[in-house]
C-alpha cells in the first residue's frame, strides 16, 4: 500500500503553539486543497518523569511532572514528512518531543 498522506501529532506547551503553526506551514504541512495552516489542537494533561541525565524544559529530574499541554494534529503529503519533523524539532522546547507520524488511507483508493 502506498502512503500519500500522513498525520503528525505532537504535544507542546501552549506558549509555543504559534511558532509551531508557522513552522508547520513553512514545511508544507497543513495544506488541504485551497487552504493552508489547517491544524487541530486541544488541551491535554501530560505526565512524565525526567531520568538522570535529562535536561527537562519543565519539571525536575527524578520527579513526576504533570502539566497542561497542547496536542496538535496536522495532515501533510508524505514527501513533506521529514521536513515537517525537522521543523517541529526546531521550534519545540522539549529535549525529547513526542512526534507521532500516522499513515492515512487514501479514500480514493478504497
Image (cartoon, helix red, strand yellow):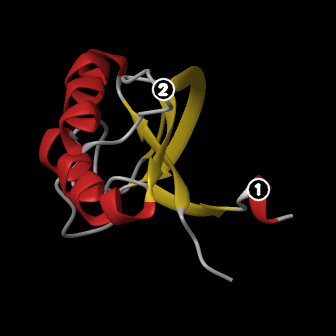
- Residues 48 and 71: in front is 71
Left or right: where 20 falls relative to 35:
left
Looking at the image, can residue 67 be seen?
A: no
Left or right: where 92 falls relative to 32:
left
Residue 63 image point, x, y percent: 41, 48
Q: In the rendered image, which residue does mark 2 sit on?
A: 39
- Looking at marks 1 and 2 on the same chain, the residue that comes earlier in the sequence is marked by 2
**Mark 1–mark 2 contact, CB under 8 Å?**
no
The answer to which quarter of the image holds residue 82 is bottom left
Q: Is residue 77 above or below residue 46?
A: below
Q: Residue at x 44, y 22 (%)?
A: 34
Q: Is residue 67 above or below residue 5?
A: above
Q: In the rendered image, which residue does mark 1 sit on?
A: 108
Residue 96 image point, x, y percent: 29, 58
- Residues 48 and 75: in front is 75
How packed is label 2: few (under 14 Cα within 10 Å), some, or many (20 or more)? some
Residue 55 image point, x, y percent: 16, 54
Amino acid at each position: 500500500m502506498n502512503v500519500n498522506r500522513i498525520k503528525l501529532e505532537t504535544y507542546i506547551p501552549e506558549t509555543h503553539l504559534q511558532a509551531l503553526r508557522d513552522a508547520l506551514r513553512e514545511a508544507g504541512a497543513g495544506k488541504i486543497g485551497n487552504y493552508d495552516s489547517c491544524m487541530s489542537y486541544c488541551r491535554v494533561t501530560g505526565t512524565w518523569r525526567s531520568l538522570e541525565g535529562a535536561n527537562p524544559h519543565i519539571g525536575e529530574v527524578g520527579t513526576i511532572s504533570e502539566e497542561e499541554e497542547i496536542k496538535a494534529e496536522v495532515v501533510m503529503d508524505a514527501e513533506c514528512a521529514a521536513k515537517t519533523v525537522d521543523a517541529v524539532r526546531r521550534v519545540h522546547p522539549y529535549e525529547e518531543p513526542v512526534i507521532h507520524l500516522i499513515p492515512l488511507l487514501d479514500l480514493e483508493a478504497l
